[in-house]
């Protein structure tokens, strides 16, 4: 899982131990345990962002949602467990293998019928969705957690797909804290995405179509509510 951004490891562990893990579904824990065996396990959604996403989904009464970047399915299962039985998640990721790792748990949870998994890069799927006018302003919620290079491209499309009053969450918007580091001291493996995240954060702050809040949970998530 991704590491938190709080000032000390102890504080982060306190948060997890006190309010996150005691309320985390056993099924989500199972996905975390399965994910730990994946070589890129650190990509899995941080468990402390889970309750925030679930809270937003409930407050919105979200029924029709979009997820870009599924990996082994932590945020997907969380969403599927939170939305109503007739809810629907359009989930996009080219990595079917990672999805298949978590799929048995999704099946066991009895929520697979809510999921439309599309094995693909996200941009062509979003463009396809936008070809049908009925999809415009039809989603209550979108969770964007894929290739950071494309966040700005996703933003333009997802804003059309999410309804006014709906919410888009961008994950990893504090990029392991590197957004506030001088470029020289950014670890090499984080350099390439850092610039895209810094640009996105500027762009979102200047975008009057959305109300935003930058939340320092997980690796930083930006919640955008479409206002017009
Ligand atoms: N939300 C996941 C974590 C996603 S990790 C969780 O809760 O664990 C990022 C994912 O984005 C990876 O699975 C990767 O395959 C996917 N991804 C990368 N490029 C993508 C693209 N262009 N379109 C859609 N997904 C992409
Ligand atoms: Ca993430």
Image (cartoon, rainbow, N blue to C red):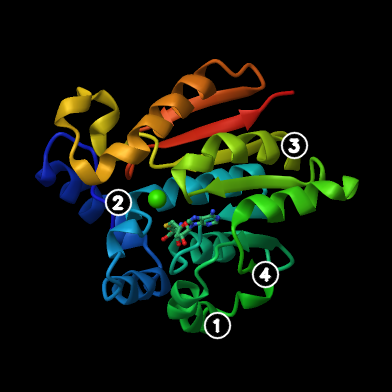
Q: Position of residue 198 (x, y in %)?
A: 39, 26
The answer to the question of whether label 3 and label 1 lie on touching residues, with beta carbons closer than 8 A, is no
Tag in front: 2 or 3: 3
Relative to 203, does residue 138 appear above or below in the rendering?
Answer: below
Q: Would you call the spot at circle 4 few (<14 residues within 10 Å), some (14-19), or many (20 or more)?
A: many
The mark nearer the N terminus, 3 or 1, is 1
Q: Is residue 41 left or right of 226 when viewed as pictured?
A: left
- Quadrant occupied by the N terminus: bottom left
Quadrant assignment, res 42: bottom left
For image coordinates 49% across by 79% down, the residue present is: 100
The mark nearer the N terminus, 3 or 4, is 4
Q: What secondary structure is marked by label 1? A: helix
Residue linked to disc 2:
19
Residue linked to disc 3:
160
Q: Would you call the spot at circle 1 few (<14 residues within 10 Å), some (14-19), or many (20 or more)?
A: few
The mark nearer the N terminus, 4 or 1, is 1
Q: CA distance from mark 4 to mark 1?
A: 11 Å
Count the labels in the image. 4
Q: Is residue 37 left or right of 206 when viewed as pictured?
A: left
Q: Is mark 2 within 8 Å of ligand 1?
A: no
The dot on residue 107 is 1
Residue linked to disc 4:
114
Relative to 222, does residue 42 appear above or below in the rendering?
Answer: below
């Amino acid at each position: 899982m991704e590491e938190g951004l709080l000032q000390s490891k102890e504080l982060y562990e306190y948060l997890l131990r006190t309010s996150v893990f005691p309320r985390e579904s056993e099924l989500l824990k199972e996905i975390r345990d399965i994910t730990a065996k994946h070589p890129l396990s650190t990509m899995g959604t941080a468990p402390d962002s889970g309750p925030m996403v679930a809270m937003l989904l409930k407050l919105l009464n979200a029924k029709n949602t979009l997820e870009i970047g599924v990996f082994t399915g932590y945020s997907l299962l969380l969403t599927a467990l939170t939305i109503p039985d007739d809810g629907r998640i359009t989930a996009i990721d080219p990595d079917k293998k990672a999805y298949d790792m978590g799929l048995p748990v999704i099946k066991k949870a009895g929520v697979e019928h809510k999921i439309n998994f599309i094995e693909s890069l996200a941009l062509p799927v979003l463009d396809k969705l936008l070809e049908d006018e009925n999809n415009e302003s039809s989603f209550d919620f979108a969770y964007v957690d894929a290739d950071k290079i494309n966040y700005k491209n996703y933003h333009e499309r997802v804003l059309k797909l999410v309804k006014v009053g709906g919410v888009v969450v961008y994950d990893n918007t504090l990029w392991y804290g590197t957004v506030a580091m001088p470029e020289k001291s950014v670890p090499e493996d984080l350099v390439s995405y850092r610039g895209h995240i810094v640009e996105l954060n500027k762009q979102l702050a200047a975008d009057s179509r959305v109300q935003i809040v930058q939340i320092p949970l997980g690796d930083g998530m930006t919640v955008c509510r479409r206002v017009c």
